[in-house]
């Protein structure tokens, strides 16, 4: 039986990791089998690519080179972790997926949604999540949250995972708009969550939506 694929998207520090942990815990407690993973990363190969993409000294990649590297990392993750888990009927929750490439490289860096969709088709065919939570936050407060978290980590400056956080605010404002455009394009798959709310408030509404969609999916299969 095919599983259910949930992704979390949004700008820097919007709370994706926090909410993924909470949702996984609640779904596990409700008896679902859940696999969590992240992008870029999740396999040894993809984690190597992650270092090049997100570390401060990772490289000065052009937007298209970046997009191709994100898809290389994504393909390994999809083939090795996501697809097998879905084939076993599990729920997969992934921190970022193709929508991040659409928003960051496609919209923020101007490659365009069509180019990203073309690359996606070559790499992944029609693979898309069943449900995507887009955590929407004012970029200034999201970046402040992310920087606070990063500065609490004892990591050498050049290894800091802040290559994108360091881009100027206008880029982050653009990519917020990019995520909202994606939600408009696919209102059935994408649910916007106000990420300025408290952690608990967000977690409750995310869990309710996820449970409702899982039930609907079960009904569809019965029918
Ligand atoms: N990227 C990625 C692309 O450009 N293209 C792509 O295709 C892909 C896949 C990944 C980078 O790569 C880019 C985007 C990214 O820049 P990353 O380190 O994984 O890098 O970065 P993020 O995914 O942005 O991860 P962050 O950890 O920065 O943000 P999260 O996971 O959204 O936030 P989280 O949960 O870690 O929370 C951040 C802090 O805020 C607090 C938390 O406790 C934590 O300290 N917090 C809240 N505080 C108040 N109220 C709330 N509601 C809060 N929720 C969390």
Image: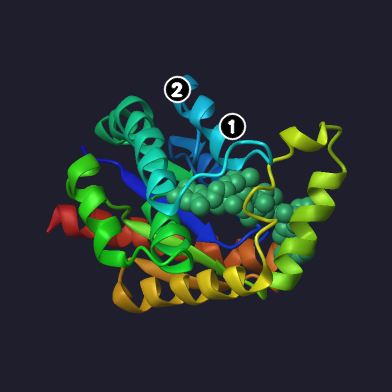
Nearer to the camera, 111 or 155: 111
Furthest residue in direction top, as rendered: 44
Q: Residue at x 62, y 74 (%)?
A: 170
**Residue 95 visible, this angle:** no
Residue 20 location, x and y as percent?
57, 49
Q: Residue at x 24, y 64 (%)?
A: 114
The answer to whether residue 162 of the structure is visible from this angle is yes
Measuring 49% from the left and 39% from the top, which residue is drawn there?
40
Mark 2 or mark 1: name the one nearer the start of the chain.
2
Give the quadrant of the N terminus.
Answer: top left
User: SS at mark 2?
Assistant: helix
Return the residue at label 2.
Answer: 45
Where residue 167 appears, as percent x and y from the top left, is 65, 60
Does the numbered disc 1 mark a residue whose Cβ is under 8 Å from ligand 1?
no
Vertical side of 174 occupied by 214: above or below: above
Distance from label 2 to label 1 (Cα)? 10 Å
Q: Locate residue 165: give its quadrant.
A: bottom right
Quadrant of the rendered image containing residue 140: bottom right
Q: Nearer the viewer, residue 30 or 57?
A: 57
Say which of 108 and 194 sits in front: 108
10 Å crowding of disc 2: few (<14), some (14-19), many (20+): few
């Amino acid at each position: 039986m095919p599983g259910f694929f949930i992704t979390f998207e949004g700008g820097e520090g919007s709370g994706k990791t926090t909410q993924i942990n909470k949702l996984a815990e609640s779904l596990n407690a409700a008896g679902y089998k859940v696999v969590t993973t992240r992008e870029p990363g999740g396999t040894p190969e993809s984690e190597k690519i992650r270092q090049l993409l997100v570390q401060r000294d990772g490289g000065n990649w052009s937007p298209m080179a970046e997009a191709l590297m994100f898809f290389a990392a994504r393909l390994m993750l999809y083939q090795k972790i996501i697809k097998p888990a879905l084939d076993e009927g599990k729920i997969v929750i992934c921190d970022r997926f193709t929508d991040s490439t659409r928003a960051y490289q496609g919209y923020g860096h101007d490659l365009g949604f069509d180019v990203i969709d073309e690359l996606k088709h070559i790499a992944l065919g029609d693979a898309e999540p069943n449900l995507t939570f887009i955590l929407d936050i004012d970029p200034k407060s999201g970046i402040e949250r992310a920087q606070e978290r990063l500065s609490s980590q004892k990591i050498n400056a050049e290894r800091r995972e802040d290559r994108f956080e360091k881009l100027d605010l206008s880029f982050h404002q653009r990519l917020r708009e990019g995520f909202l455009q994606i939600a408009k394009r696919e209102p059935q798959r994408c649910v916007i969550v106000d990420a300025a709310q408290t952690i608990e408030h967000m977690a409750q509404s995310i869990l309710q939506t996820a449970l409702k969609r899982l039930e609907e999916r079960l009904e569809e299969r019965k029918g």
